[in-house]
Image (spheres, grey):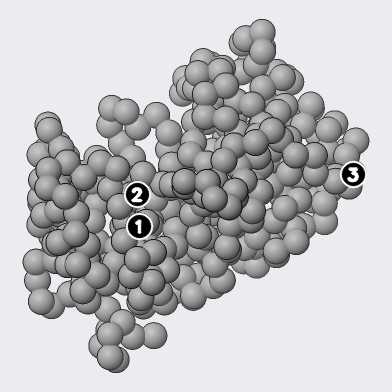
Amino acid sequence: MSAHGGESPTVSVSIRTGPGEDAHAAQLAARLDGAPVRICPTGAAAWRPWTRRATHHLVLDAAVRPHPHLLAQVQEAVAAQPRAVLRLFTRSDGYASHASRVAAFSGCSWFVPPGPVPSSVAVVLPVPEAAEFARSVPGGDLDPVGLLLQRFAAGQGLSLLASTADLVQLEGPGAHAPATAFLSAARAPADWWRRPSLVSPSSIPVVHLRDGEPLSYESVPGAPDGWRLRARREVPTPHARRLARVMQERLLGTEVARSHLRAAAVLLGVAGVLRDQLLLAAGQGRPSDEFGTAVAREAAATLALGPLAEAVPAASRPDGAAELRDAFRVLYDEMTAILGTAPPGPARGADP
């Protein structure tokens, strides 16, 4: 598919810098060799297209590590979704990350982010709309620019989609929450970006950002941002005893579970959210190839990392995070096998 009037898509890049990020920006620009790149301060300048040769404009935060094939995949993505605003990074601890997981477990390559999403770490949009957005934003610091983008897309009648396969990873200070599913050593097949999008369900099983409590993130008509946290809703669960046994076997023997008085209960609660998300996804579909399976497994692997940093401190240590990654990948495999939704074997490529 072409981008505009039959022409192949081309992408210009602005790297948005903050205080003390000049060196990061220069390193990132060097990694994008071959692309037209400009380093810009935070503000409207980063969103303003600066070359007539591009059909789409990509804005990256300076403090990211790009996928080795970032630019090629962005070109494939905008060829598949030429008239959309595309988010290419979703933090693993935000409520939008749980919609990303349900979409990944369903085999979808895109999802519609639920509720307000302030992040704009990696976004690409058509050049005319990028120029219009740059003119519409207030001067100075754009935070939270993600919310402005959501309002802009809605006002312009543009689709706003987020990728289930993240194409950048946050690095440096403050990057405690990794991407939901960043596969640094695996490249998406070209047709991946043309696959269906998931419209976020009206009720999504989530984990509270601070205490690890299972909750429900729900669409509420009339609410200012349209979404609210509610108490966890019970989900009819086939094979409930087998699933509970697998959760206990995989988690209660971990060092993280033994590290804190509440750790075991919190981990089992998070595993229950994974189970509920898999049940919700089962009605939509499942991954159909190895890359989709790898995305789903990595999305499961990061489920416990961000939300448990405060509730279970051991989960934020490198050894604890690695232990939880492994445990939740195995839980994904075993739960999908029990539920009869096991997809094809995974491609390698997740971060260690």
Badge 1 amino acid = Arg
Pointer 3 residue: 239
* Disc 2 secondary structure class: helix
Pointer 2 residue: 147
Badge 3 amino acid = His
Q: Nearer the viewer, residue 195 or 331?
A: 195
Q: Residue at x 58, y 52 (%)?
A: 221
Tell me the CA gap for discs 3 and 2: 41 Å
Q: Is residue 319 above or below residue 277?
A: above
Q: Is residue 167 above or below residue 196?
A: above
Pointer 1 residue: 151
Residue 312 drawn at (x, y percent): 56, 17
Query: Residue 149 sits in which quadrant?
Result: bottom left
Tell me the CA gap for discs 3 and 1: 43 Å
Q: Residue furthest front?
A: 222
Q: Residue at x 52, y 24 (%)?
A: 210
Q: Is residue 128 above or below residue 205?
A: below
Is any atom of residue 323 visible in this view?
A: no
Residue 176 drawn at (x, y percent): 39, 29
Is any atom of residue 115 visible in this view?
A: yes
